[in-house]
Each structure stands twice: as structure tokens, then as C-alpha cells.
Image (cartoon, rainbow, N blue to C red):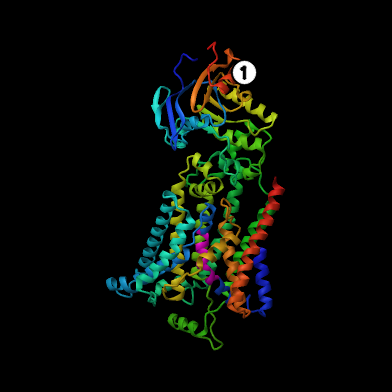
């Protein structure tokens, strides 16, 4: 798997805000069907780094290659066109709209007249949600009225419904209970089997260690290193996060 | 909202000794409300998108002046006073100027990042100044005859026959919509309401249409005007006098048309969906690939166009363009929108609610005039009602939200 061409290759990514180098010369690969955990303290630069892939920030320097071809990602719309979907920590839902409107936001289904086809969108939403959360029934309510897990399900549904190849999940289980966390973990494994490449971003090693094939650790805007989870212990990864040095065996 | 309107109507009618709920007063009320209603439909989208427009009164003023000068001074020089194209060209010029002003506001707000409150507060002063400057403060009158129909009055009503036609079309549309929506939901296997519920809802809407038609058709033209029309059509005037009904007023039809168009934009198009998404969570809209700046500009362009339509109604009704026209209208429009349930926090609001809100405001005002209240007292009452209405709305909303969670 790792011998094949990577699905995503990010090389020498840098970005500054007001003279501060938030991300400094960071490189990272992701293969199809692989889960890569991106770890680091709050403020280590991991969210900023990944937002250059999801189109929210434009890098000052660096190169992104998808399937070996160099691409320019200037906006979330560009990212989506390359099959990159992001589930943000804040979920990025419009609280005043219902599940279907959120799921299709920016990609609405339309009738032959060019008007919104709300019935078709609700029908598709019912199908996706049946797979993610069979108990979900509040299709007519604004997502404001939903629980944390239900809102998360809507955000995930939005990301996977459009045949994403690359999925970015920023603290996907931060707001969830144990039951819902398990659901998300199962879903991640299922998506991995379908050949989707997944970035899991977290400041908590326990969220990602069991799910990830590799973990990449960032500190102070720099990449500390990338290690396969099979060959390291949690303590070694913790050392990388805290000290910012690679374990000696690597 | 409807309950508030009905209680105001009944209350004022009793207090004014039955002078309020007459065909004549209701007809006039509908005409007086039309211009604020038109602007309120646009204000809903502006406020839903988390902006505000304080300049609508001044924009109405300057656009009214442009339309006045176009039809009384510019066009007659080119095509004479009786050309049938004058009214449409004048209206077109006004709509173009309104759209341009909205475009300017929108670009400054969306691309230069100046808050809408400031841009339109500036606009309030600038456009009022421009309205004065066009004719150095001179009032422009009279308006073109065809143009005046947009303002209502004897010439600006469509008569009883056409009123029945409009009412019939409205009923047909209501029934068709109910049947169509139901069939579409059944096709994909969604739950539908029981038939009796659909019949009751559609029946109430049809009854409302019928009531409006009957009221409009029971307000007769003044006898002399009726005689003149009879003479023109070669009818014999019976000895007991002739009764010809006004029918619906043209400005009211324009306002309802604007309401339907803006509701359609808000509910059935991507543009409307994005306006609401932007108001609910601007960051989410941006991350979903919505071009939020373009949407903001379009909202203000639409507002400018609707100001121009309102200006046409207002100048046509007054049969003049004055530089003070539309003064304080921004406050009535915003008040109507907010009373109609649009949240100043953005993301929530309906066009129909705002139009009802406009009707509530105008009903209060006209009711107080009928009751003989002094102007300062009227202002006090309107101000209090605005605050109390929004407070009640908040109470109601917080209760229903808790019920839903």
C-alpha cells in the first residue's frame, strides 16, 4: 500500500499570520484506505496545516499533489472538486436550516425549473442518515434542535454523501458521549475499507491511536515526525508531542 | 401575528365608532401600506443575512425624484407628453438607479468590509441630499397619467371584473399548490397530512382571498366618476344612481406581486437558501463553498430595486416627487419586518410576516387618526407597540424552542 503513489502529498507547506509562522515547512502523505492521525498540543499548527488542504487557508509556500498531480486549492469549493471533504470541529452547520438543507449546502439538488428540489434532498438525506444513525427522525427541524451526536451525524453525512476520496476530521469525537464515539469509530473503519484516505486531527492521543495507521506529530508549527502506530507505544508518541523529538528507535 | 392584526382591527373599529372596518377605509389602508410592504419584503432578506439597511427611505426619495424628473422633464422633450412609453421608461430608469445604489452599498459592505449599519447610515444622508440636489429642492409634479395608476386612486384600481379574475386565479393557485405538494411527497413515500387538514388550510386561504375580493368590490367609485365612466362607455345612468366598484388597487397588486416574487426567491432558489445559511452561520456558508460576498451584494441590489418599486407607488400616489419623500420610512420598514417575526440576529424571518407587520403598523396609525389622537401621541403608541411586539415574540419563541429541544 505505502509503495503505491500517495493519494495526497503535501510538501513544504508554510503559512504565516501577522509575522508569526503558524506552519513552517511541513510535509505529509496520505494513501488510499489509510488513516493518519495528526497530533499536537492546542496551537501546534495542526488545524492550520490541514486547512490549507481543505481550502480554508492559502499557503504562503508549498505544494499539494493529488494522485501525483500538482493542484491549486484556493477555496473550499476547489477542495471539494478534488474529492476532499472536511468535518470541522465546530461542525460548520447552519443552525437555522434543517438536516437536508445543511447536507446539500452549496450543492443543492434542483428541479428542471432550476428551483430547489427540497423533496428530493430530503429523500436522499433520509437514506444517508438511515445508514449513519437509524434513530434519526428530526428531518423537519432546524439542526439547532438536534443533540450533539445527531449534529455530528449530519456533518459526517454531508462529508461522505458526495463520494469523498479524502476525508479530514477535526476533533471528530470531542463533543460526543461514549456510545456516539464508538459509532464514529466504526464509521471510520468502514470508510477506510472503502478506500477513503482519512486525516484524524486531535490533541488527545487516545482518540486516534487505535484508529490510525500512522500518526504525525506537530509542535510549534513544525513537523516532529511521522511513525506507524504498530511500531510505537502511546508513551513514545506522548514524548514526541511533549518534547518535540522523535523516539530513538525510529 | 394574525391574531394581533384582528384584535387591532376590531379594537380600533369599536373605539372609532365603526369607522375603521368599512370597505372604504380598508381599501385606503391597503393602498397606504403598499409602499412600506414592498420595501419590507426586501428588508427581510437584508436582516436575515445579518445586515441592516437604514437608507431605504432616502433611496425611495432620490429614486422618486429621478422618476419624476424623467417623466416630466427629460422624456417629454424627446417624445412629447402623451407618449405611452413614458411611464415604463421612467419606471425603468428608477429601477436602474435603485439597483445601482444597492450595488454600490453591497460592494462597499461585502468587499470593503464596512458594516452595513455604517454604509447605509451614510446612505441615509447622501441619498437624501441627492434627492434635494436633483431639482434644488423643487417639487416635481404632475406625474404621467399612466404612471399614476401605480399609486391607486380612482384610475389605479382594476374594477370588479378583473378583481374576480385575480381572486379566481389566486384560488386556483392555492388549490394547485396544495395538490401538487401532496402528490410530490407521496411519490417519494413521505408522510402527508390527513386530507381534511389540507382542505381546512387551503379552504381558509381561499376564504381570505374571497373576503379581500368582496371588500375591494364593495367600495364604490364616487358617483361623478361613475357617471363619467358610464358616459364614456355609452351607458345610460339609472335614476337611482350608478354603482361601479373600485376593485383591487394597482399598488396592492404590486405589493402582493413583490411579496410572491421575494418569497419565491427566499424559499425556492439557491440564492434564498444561501441568504438564510449566511444568516444562520456565515462561516459554515463560506466553508460550504457559498460565495457569501456575492450573495450580500445581490441582497442589497434586490433591496435597491424594491425601493425603486416603492418609490414608483409613492410618487404615483402623491402625484408628485418631493425631496422629503420617504423620510422615516426606514424605521417603518424595519419595524414592520421585526414585528413580522424577522430576528435581528439573522437567519430567521418570513416575507409574509413582514408584510403583515407593515399592515399592523399602518392599521395602528390609521386607526389612531380615525380616533382623533394627536400626532405625538400616535408616535408614542407606535413606539411602544414595536417594543412590546418584539418582546412578546421573544417570549413565544423561547417557549417553543424549549418545547422542541
Residue A110 in view, yes or no: yes
Disc 1: host chain: A
Task: Tell me what residue is drawn at x 68 percent, y 68 percent.
Answer: B7
Give percent across and percent down for residue B251. Answer: 49, 69
Q: Could you say which quadrant of the image residue A207 lies in?
A: top right
Within the magenta stretch, is there residue B35? Answer: yes
**A230 or B305: nearer the eye?**
A230
Q: Residue furthest top?
A: A249
**B36 or A216: nearer the eye?**
A216
Report helix, strand or loop for mark 1. helix
Residue A161 in view, yes or no: no
Is A179 placed left or right of B152 in the picture? right
Q: Could you say which quadrant of the image residue B215 lies in?
A: bottom right
Give percent across and percent down for residue A74. Answer: 42, 35
Task: Tell me what residue is drawn at x 48 percent, y 43 percent.
Answer: B290
Give percent across and percent down for residue B2. Answer: 65, 63
Give percent across and percent down for residue A10. Answer: 44, 25
Name the residue carrying label 1. A234
**B313 or A235: nearer the eye?**
A235
Within the magenta stretch, is there residue B167? Answer: no
Label 1 CA crowd tier, 10 Å (few <14, some 14–19, many 20+)? few
Q: Could you say which quadrant of the image residue A91 lies in?
A: top right
Task: Tell me what residue is drawn at x 45 percent, y 71 percent.
Answer: B325
**A235 or B388: nearer the eye?**
A235
Tag count: 1
Task: Tell me what residue is drawn at x 54 percent, y 89 percent.
Answer: B239
Q: Which residues are magenta?
A: B30-42
Predominant SS along the magenta part:
helix
Q: Residue furthest bottom?
A: B239
B178 vs A249: above or below: below
Amino acid at each position: 500500500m505505502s509503495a503505491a503513489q500517495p493519494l495526497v502529498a503535501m510538501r513544504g507547506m508554510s503559512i504565516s499570520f501577522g509575522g508569526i509562522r503558524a506552519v513552517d515547512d511541513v510535509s505529509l502523505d496520505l494513501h488510499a484506505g489509510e488513516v493518519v492521525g495528526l497530533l499536537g498540543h492546542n496551537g501546534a499548527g495542526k488545524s492550520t496545516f490541514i486547512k490549507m488542504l481543505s481550502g480554508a487557508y492559502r499557503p504562503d509556500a508549498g505544494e499539494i499533489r493529488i494522485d501525483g498531480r500538482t493542484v491549486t486549492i484556493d477555496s473550499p469549493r476547489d477542495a471539494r472538486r478534488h474529492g476532499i471533504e472536511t468535518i470541522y470541529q465546530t461542525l460548520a452547520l447552519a443552525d437555522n436550516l434543517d438536516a437536508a438543507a445543511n447536507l446539500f449546502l452549496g450543492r443543492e439538488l434542483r428541479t428542471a425549473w432550476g428551483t430547489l428540489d427540497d423533496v428530493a434532498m430530503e429523500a436522499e438525506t433520509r437514506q444517508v442518515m438511515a445508514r449513519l444513525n437509524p434513530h434519526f427522525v428530526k428531518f423537519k427541524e432546524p439542526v439547532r434542535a438536534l443533540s450533539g451526536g445527531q449534529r455530528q451525524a449530519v456533518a459526517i453525512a454531508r462529508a461522505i454523501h458526495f463520494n469523498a476520496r479524502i476525508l479530514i476530521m477535526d476533533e471528530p469525537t470531542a463533543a460526543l458521549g461514549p456510545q456516539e464515539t464508538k459509532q464514529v469509530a466504526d464509521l471510520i473503519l468502514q470508510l477506510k475499507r472503502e478506500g477513503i484516505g482519512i486525516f484524524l486531527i486531535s490533541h488527545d492521543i487516545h482518540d486516534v491511536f487505535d484508529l490510525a495507521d500512522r500518526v504525525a506529530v506537530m509542535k510549534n508549527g513544525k513537523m516532529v515526525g511521522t511513525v506507524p502506530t504498530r511500531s510505537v507505544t502511546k508513551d513514545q508518541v506522548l514524548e514526541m508531542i511533549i518534547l518535540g523529538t522523535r523516539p530513538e528507535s525510529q | 401575528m394574525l391574531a394581533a392584526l384582528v384584535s387591532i382591527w376590531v379594537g380600533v373599529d369599536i373605539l372609532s365608532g365603526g369607522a375603521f372596518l368599512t370597505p372604504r377605509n380598508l381599501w385606503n389602508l391597503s393602498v397606504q401600506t403598499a409602499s412600506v410592504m414592498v420595501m419590507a419584503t426586501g428588508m427581510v432578506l437584508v436582516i436575515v443575512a445579518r445586515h441592516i439597511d437604514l437608507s431605504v427611505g432616502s433611496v425611495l426619495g432620490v429614486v422618486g425624484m429621478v422618476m419624476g424628473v424623467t417623466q416630466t422633464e427629460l422624456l417629454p422633450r424627446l417624445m412629447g407628453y402623451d407618449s405611452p412609453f413614458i411611464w415604463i421608461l421612467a419606471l425603468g430608469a428608477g429601477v436602474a438607479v435603485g439597483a445601482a445604489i444597492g450595488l454600490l452599498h453591497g460592494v462597499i459592505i461585502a468587499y470593503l468590509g464596512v458594516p452595513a449599519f455604517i454604509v447605509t447610515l451614510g446612505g441615509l444622508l447622501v441619498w437624501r441630499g441627492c434627492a434635494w440636489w436633483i431639482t434644488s429642492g423643487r417639487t416635481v409634479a404632475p406625474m404621467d397619467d399612466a404612471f399614476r395608476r401605480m399609486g391607486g386612486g380612482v384610475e389605479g384600481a382594476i374594477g370588479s371584473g378583473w378583481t374576480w379574475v385575480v381572486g379566481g386565479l389566486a384560488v386556483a393557485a392555492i388549490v394547485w399548490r396544495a395538490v401538487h405538494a401532496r402528490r410530490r411527497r407521496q411519490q417519494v413515500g413521505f408522510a402527508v397530512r390527513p386530507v381534511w387538514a389540507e382542505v381546512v388550510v387551503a379552504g381558509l386561504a381561499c376564504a381570505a382571498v374571497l373576503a379581500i375580493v368582496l371588500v375591494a368590490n364593495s367600495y364604490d367609485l364616487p358617483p361623478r366618476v361613475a357617471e363619467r365612466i358610464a358616459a364614456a362607455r355609452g351607458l345610460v345612468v339609472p335614476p337611482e344612481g350608478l354603482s361601479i366598484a373600485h376593485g383591487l388597487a394597482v399598488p396592492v397588486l404590486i405589493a402582493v406581486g413583490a411579496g410572491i416574487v421575494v418569497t419565491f426567491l427566499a424559499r425556492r432558489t439557491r440564492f434564498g437558501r444561501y441568504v438564510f445559511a449566511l444568516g444562520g452561520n456565515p462561516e459554515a456558508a463560506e466553508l460550504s463553498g457559498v460565495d457569501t460576498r456575492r450573495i450580500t451584494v445581490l441582497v442589497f441590489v434586490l433591496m435597491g430595486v424594491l425601493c425603486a418599486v416603492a418609490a414608483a407607488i409613492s410618487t404615483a400616489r402623491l402625484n408628485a416627487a418631493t425631496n422629503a419623500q420617504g423620510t422615516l420610512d426606514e424605521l417603518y420598514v424595519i419595524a414592520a419586518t421585526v414585528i413580522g417575526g424577522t430576528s435581528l440576529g439573522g437567519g430567521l424571518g418570513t416575507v409574509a410576516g413582514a408584510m403583515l407587520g407593515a399592515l399592523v403598523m399602518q392599521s395602528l396609525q390609521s386607526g389612531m387618526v380615525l380616533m382623533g389622537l394627536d400626532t405625538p401621541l400616535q408616535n408614542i403608541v407606535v413606539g411602544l407597540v414595536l417594543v412590546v411586539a418584539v418582546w412578546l415574540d421573544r417570549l413565544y419563541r423561547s417557549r417553543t424552542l424549549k418545547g422542541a429541544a
